[in-house]
Image (cartoon, rainbow, N blue to C red):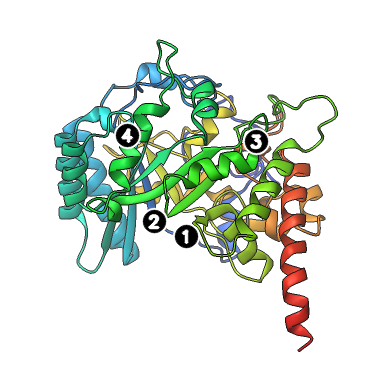
């Protein structure tokens, strides 16, 4: 696969890095019998702008600023085309389930009416026997009861971004005026957690902040009684490494390890934590459904507000245009993306890892870490994650706790 003898037939930006765009021969890979995994999750960027100004946002604050040149809101034409292409892909591959995530920017800015019409387009486009699940990731500051009632009737599962305690959340997740957003989010979470709307509550997404107390952050999130929590490492790479205080070698890993100890050591399960559960599954010989860990194929595509078919949008943190494929739902099927080197690199598991990662004893668990965090200018994405040492700390802690509990059972 390390050859540039045959390029992908898809247009590739001249500033894309060598891996995977020059060094991954998709044609040779196909000749070995490898076949791509069909896309099962589609992220629709229904609104390009946001009503918050979070200082760590990969859309607005980091390398890629393509949002400036895209339509503010996804048009009816693009909505119908996206729905049709998703249905087409499900039909071609005989999929029994497809997931669509309404995203942004801030998806609620598109308006409940537009979202409901889009969901109707999606449901009508699905082939017989294919179940459509619709989710939304939102900052929730405008999520009121009438909107929630309409989304609930459409069976939309809603995930909310919130960073723990009010003072920690408001430090980074602010309105453009500088005012913190936690009070507005707290009101929305009160609605989502109520008996009427509980079935619509998917969970919370929290960005790891080593400056905040880890256990206090976790218990602050628990106050909202979430069905699940997902922790996300701040987007960073080898050109833009994560911030670390002097003397702190692995602050993010240490932070997550303390949260894990609190979560795992609770007398009963208080909530699910996706990252921890995925690592535990991998340590016990299972697979992962998360793109943060493991070697399972990533089967996700993003549709931008202008219809562009793109790679996972966290790549926007690497360099300008990192998500580009040159494809668009107005003109191209999703199958065209399955031969794009950027998509293929996320589906070939061990073959996409650097030599250093492949030699690592925990490579099957870590999976090289989050793909966006592997980027190094001039090389691309075939590197260890910039959080390599942090991942070793977290995985080591989880393995130790599991081994301690399972060893006495094995000796019975």
Residue highlighted by disc 2: 40
Residue highlighted by disc 1: 37
Q: Residues within 10 Å of mark 4 (few under 14, many from 20)?
A: some
Q: Secondary structure at mark 1?
A: loop
Residue at x 40%, y 21% (from the top left corner): 52
Whole-Å distance between the Cαs marked 4 and 2? 33 Å
Whole-Å distance between the Cαs marked 2 and 1? 9 Å
* x, y percent for residue 256: 67, 45
Pick whichever of labels 3 and 2 is earlier in the sequence: 2
Whole-Å distance between the Cαs marked 3 and 2? 37 Å
Q: Is residue 337 left or right of residue 216?
A: left
Q: Nearer the viewer, residue 188 or 54?
A: 188
Q: Is residue 39 left or right of residue 107?
A: right
Pick whichever of labels 1 and 3 is earlier in the sequence: 1
Residue at x 55%, y 21% (from the top left corner): 62
Which of the labelled discs sits on residue 213, or is there none?
3
Q: Quadrant of residue 267?
A: bottom right
Q: Nearer the viewer, mark 4 or mark 2?
A: 4
Whole-Å distance between the Cαs marked 1 and 3? 40 Å
The quarter of the image holding the C terminus is bottom right
Residue highlighted by disc 4: 187
- Check contact, mark 2 vs mark 1: CB within 8 A: yes
């Amino acid at each position: 696969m390390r050859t540039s003898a045959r390029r992908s037939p898809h247009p590739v930006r001249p500033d894309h890095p060598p891996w995977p765009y020059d060094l991954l021969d998709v044609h040779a890979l196909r000749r070995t019998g490898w076949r791509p995994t069909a896309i099962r999750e589609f992220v629709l960027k229904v609104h390009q702008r946001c009503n918050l100004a979070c200082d760590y946002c990969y859309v607005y604050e980091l390398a890629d600023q393509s949002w400036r040149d895209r339509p503010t809101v996804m048009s009816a034409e693009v909505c119908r085309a996206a729905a049709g292409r998703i249905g087409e892909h499900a039909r071609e591959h005989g999929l029994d389930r497809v997931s669509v995530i309404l995203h942004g920017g801030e998806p609620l800015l598109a308006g409940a009416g537009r979202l409901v019409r889009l969901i109707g387009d999606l449901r009508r486009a699905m082939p017989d026997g294919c179940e459509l699940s619709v989710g939304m990731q939102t900052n929730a500051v405008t999520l009121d009861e009438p909107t929630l009632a309409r989304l609930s009737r459409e069976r939309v599962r809603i995930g909310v971004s919130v960073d723990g305690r009010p003072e920690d959340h408001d430090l980074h997740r602010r309105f453009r005026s500088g005012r913190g957003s936690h009070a507005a989010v707290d009101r929305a979470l009160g609605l989502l957690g109520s008996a009427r709307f509980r079935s619509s509550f998917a969970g919370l997404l929290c960005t790891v902040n080593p400056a905040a107390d880890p256990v206090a952050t976790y218990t602050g999130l628990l106050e909202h009684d979430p069905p699940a929590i997902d922790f996300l490492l701040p987007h960073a790479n080898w050109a833009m490494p994560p911030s670390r205080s002097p003397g702190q070698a692995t602050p993010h890993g240490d932070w997550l390890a303390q949260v894990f100890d609190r979560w795992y050591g609770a007398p009963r399960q208080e909530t699910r934590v996706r990252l921890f559960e995925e690592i535990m599954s991998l340590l016990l010989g299972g697979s992962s459904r998360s793109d943060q860990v493991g070697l399972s194929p990533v089967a996700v595509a993003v549709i931008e507000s202008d219809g562009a078919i793109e790679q996972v949008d966290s790549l926007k943190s690497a360099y300008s245009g990192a998500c580009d494929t040159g494809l668009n739902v107005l003109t191209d099927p999703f199958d065209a993306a399955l031969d794009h080197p950027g998509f293929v690199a996320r589906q070939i598991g061990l073959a996409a890892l650097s030599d250093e990662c492949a030699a690592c004893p925990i490579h099957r668990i870590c999976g090289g870490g989050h793909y966006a965090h592997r980027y190094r200018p001039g090389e691309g994405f075939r590197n260890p994650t910039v959080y390599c040492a942090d991942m070793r700390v977290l995985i080591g802690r989880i393995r130790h706790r599991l081994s301690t509990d399972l060893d006495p059972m094995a000796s019975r």
